[in-house]
Amino acid sequence: MIVVTGATGNVGRPLVQALAGAGEQVTAVSRRVTKGAGRVRFHQADLAEPESLKPAVHGADAMFLLTSPDFLANGDLTEVMNVVRAAGVRRVVLLSSQGVGTQRHPSNLEDAVMQSGLEWTMLRPGNFNSNALQWAGSVRTRRIVAAPFGDVALPAIDPVDIAAVAAVALREPGHGANI
């Protein structure tokens, strides 16, 4: 079984669909519950409350980990990883940020995953294509695109492509590390 956190988001939703379409048993985790169908069961949990994850990760082999912006202010990923490891999960794929590689974002989330003792894969996409509509107003009114790191080239990627890469890393051996 594969657990997908952030299952109702831009990356999580197509990831759940890709995994279920490949025949995987999937537990879709979000703070809002949606109905499950077929090979997908839904579980309401909040990463800021790691104990709420226990029923979702019980019996899982792998987990896609997506943290919300408010988790960064209120959560402790080390505690989440303790719950995940105790449940017997072997592999974690973290949706991180290209900003970690450019040292524009802190690496504490990646550090918690790398120090968990589990096999891990970090995905560090740049800008999401789905965010481009946020620029529509400034393009129309001022003919500019405002980006958080104007001095760094950030390629845009479709969240569906990120989900496809995550599905491969979750399902197939050879894409993880364990330091």
Image (tube, rainbow, N blue to C red):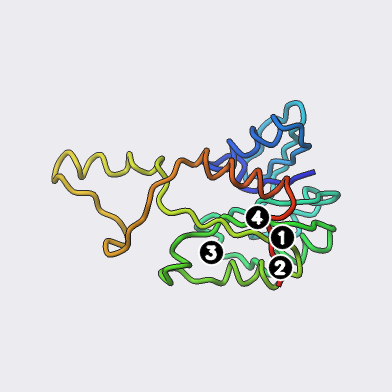
Image location of residue 39, percent across then percent down: 77, 31
Q: Do the residues labelled 2 and 4 touch (CB within 8 Å)?
A: no
- Which numbered tag is attached to residue 93? 4
- Which numbered tag is attached to residue 72? 3
Q: Which residue lies furthest to the left in this view?
A: 142
> Which amino acid type corresponds to the residue marked 4 in the rendered image?
Val
Image location of residue 100, percent across then percent down: 48, 67
Image location of residue 69, percent across then percent down: 50, 57
> Which amino acid type corresponds to the residue marked 3 in the rendered image?
Leu
- Which numbered tag is attached to residue 79? 2
Q: Are marks 1 and 3 in contact (CB under 8 Å)?
A: no
Of callouts 1 and 4, which one flags the residue occurring earlier in the amino acid sequence? 1
Q: Is residue 89 left or right of residue 31?
A: right
> Which amino acid type corresponds to the residue marked 2 in the rendered image?
Glu
Image location of residue 43, percent across then percent down: 73, 42
Rendering quarter of residue 136: top left
In three-dimensional space, the C-alpha distance between marks 1 and 3, rounded to whole angstroms, equals 14 Å
Q: Do the residues labelled 3 and 2 touch (CB within 8 Å)?
A: no
Query: Which residue lies at the image location 86% right of the left edge and 49% below the top edge?
Result: 59
Compare residues 148 and 119 and report the one nearer the observer: 119
- Which numbered tag is attached to residue 50? 1
In three-dimensional space, the C-alpha distance between marks 4 and 3, rounded to whole angstroms, equals 17 Å
Of callouts 2 and 1, which one flags the residue occurring earlier in the amino acid sequence? 1
In three-dimensional space, the C-alpha distance between marks 2 and 1, rounded to whole angstroms, equals 6 Å
Q: How crowded is mark 3: few (under 14 residues within 10 Å), some or many (20 or more)?
A: few
Q: Is residue 109 above or below residue 34?
A: below
- Dot in front, 2 or 4: 4
Query: Which residue lies at the image location 70% right of the left edge and 57% below the top edge?
Result: 92
Of callouts 3 and 2, which one flags the residue occurring earlier in the amino acid sequence? 3
